Amino acid sequence: MRTNSKVIIEIARDRDALLIAAMSKDLIEFGLSWRWKPSRVLSMIRDPDCVVLVAREDNNLVAFALMEYHEIHGHLNLLATDPAYRRQGHARQLLQWLLASARVAGLATVGLEVRSDNDGAQAFYQRLGFRIEKRRKGYYAKGLDALSMVLHLIEPSQAARRPQ
């Protein structure tokens, strides 16, 4: 584990797409079909309704997060940290940045899917207030289930009263 690192959080650049895609393949999509290829990541970096954040140490990309913003909800598509940099709060910082921007944007909820066999990720999201909403059978290739998780940024009773 690395300590006392100087990590900078910033918006991803086009040139980050290749490394983000490779990290997604190795750290998130392992054992599955590779869906987050460089061209898809690049399109999200360029999409005005998405935010792709990176954490860098000495110009090395050590973590990333990708979230889509819709009218009343957000969806966290990807979040990963290089294993050498885990347990230092980088993923938490990235997610907290995205959640703060979602609140400013007035979003009611943020959702995500997590592999049903990834207990560590489930616990991480639960510590940040996400709750399991439902199990999605065969969501991933090879029949692997996902858990849909949601974080309410606005209480559901208040969200129902918001003008559309």
Image (cartoon, rainbow, N blue to C red):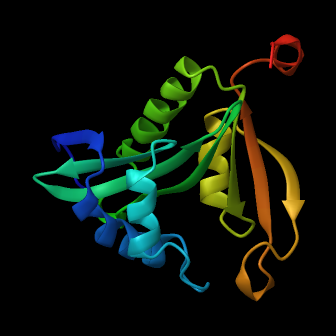
Picture quarter with the N terminus? bottom left
Q: Which residue is drawn at 68% across and 60% down?
A: 114
Residue 95 in view of the camera: yes
Say whether residue 5 is left or right of residue 109: left
Q: Residue at x 81, y 13 (%)?
A: 163
Residue 112 % position (x, y): 68, 50
Q: Measured along the vertical axis of the image, is residue 40 above or below residue 143?
A: above
Residue 125 % position (x, y): 63, 44
Say whether residue 131 is left or right of residue 20: right
Taking depth in this image into account, of 106 and 119 the one nearest to the observer is: 106
Taking depth in this image into account, of 98 and 107 the one nearest to the observer is: 107
Residue 53 % position (x, y): 37, 46
Residue sitting at the far left: 58
Say whether residue 146 is left or right of residue 49: right
Q: Measured along the vertical axis of the image, is residue 116 above or below residue 26?
A: above
Residue 86 in view of the camera: no
Q: Which residue is drawn at 73% across and 76% down?
A: 140
Q: Measured along the vertical axis of the image, is residue 63 above or below residue 133?
A: below
Q: Residue at x 17, y 50 (%)?
A: 57
Taking depth in this image into account, of 156 and 14 the one nearest to the observer is: 14
Picture quarter with the C terminus? top right
Q: Measured along the vertical axis of the image, is residue 19 above or below residue 100?
A: below
Say whether residue 159 is left or right of residue 42: right
Q: Residue 6's image quarter? A: top left
